[in-house]
Image (spheres, rainbow, N blue to C red):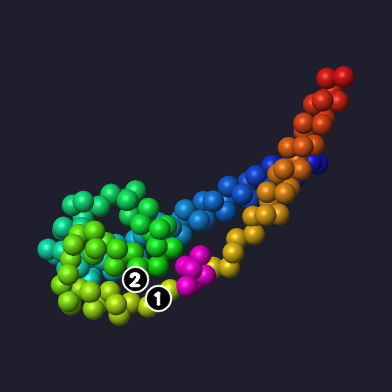
Amino acid sequence: MNRIEGEIAKKDMELAKIDLGIRALDKMNSILSKGREIFKSEFWNKIEGTLTSEKLMDIMVEENFNEKRVLAKLGEIAKISDKHVLDAIDQLPDEEVEAVWGKEIETKELDEILDQKIEDKKRSLEIERF
């Protein structure tokens, strides 16, 4: 029974990580769509030519997945100072992280279950050795 509970907890943790990854990719897609729309062709080509998905993800994490701040950062990196572009970015709403990720994911309980299962397994292996 303990083994099954441990496996379930591990699977739940893996699913939570996959869910976060999917949400991050959805947010990246939204940022790229808005970026193409706001920066238009010449400015977007300038950004797209130097931006990797890893760099974009780093910026997204740095800016707490806030689209307005991410797009402003992209404008800074590409040294874009066009008033219309900056105004368009400024018009975007400031999103709360909760709106992006939902309520805090409850992984603490899963971590505690996994830790307990690991400790139980260690104890049972020590007992078997004696």
- The verdict on residue 97 being magenta is yes
In this rendering, the answer to whether 93 lies above or below 81 is below
Disc 2 on helix, strand or loop? helix
Within-10-Å neighbours for mark 2: few <14, some 14–19, many 20+: many
Residue 103 location, x and y as percent? 58, 68
- The verdict on residue 43 being magenta is no
| Residue 94, disc | 1
Q: Which residue is mark 2?
A: 68
- Indicate the amino acid at tag 2: Lys
Q: Is residue 39 visible?
A: yes
Residue 11 location, x and y as percent? 63, 46
Location of the N terminus (image quadrant):
top right
Q: Is residue 80 left or right of residue 125?
A: left
Within-10-Å neighbours for mark 1: few <14, some 14–19, many 20+: few
Residue 61 location, x and y as percent? 42, 57
Q: Quadrant of residue 34?
A: bottom left
Query: Do the CB atoms of the residues marked 1 and 2 lie less than 8 Å apart?
Result: yes
Magenta stretch, main secondary structure class: helix
- Indicate the amino acid at tag 1: Asp
In this rendering, the answer to whether 52 lies above or below 63 is above
Q: Residue furthest left?
A: 42
What stretch of residues is rendered in magenta?
96-101
Residue at x 44%, y 63% (from the top left corner) = 64
Q: Is residue 47 left or right of residue 62?
A: left
Count of numbered badges drawn on the protein: 2
Residue at x 18%, y 66% (from the top left corner) = 80
Residue situated in front as seen by the camera: 76 or 34: 76
- Earlier sequence position, callout 1 versus callout 2: 2
Residue at x 33%, y 55% (from the top left corner) = 56
Location of the C terminus (image quadrant):
top right
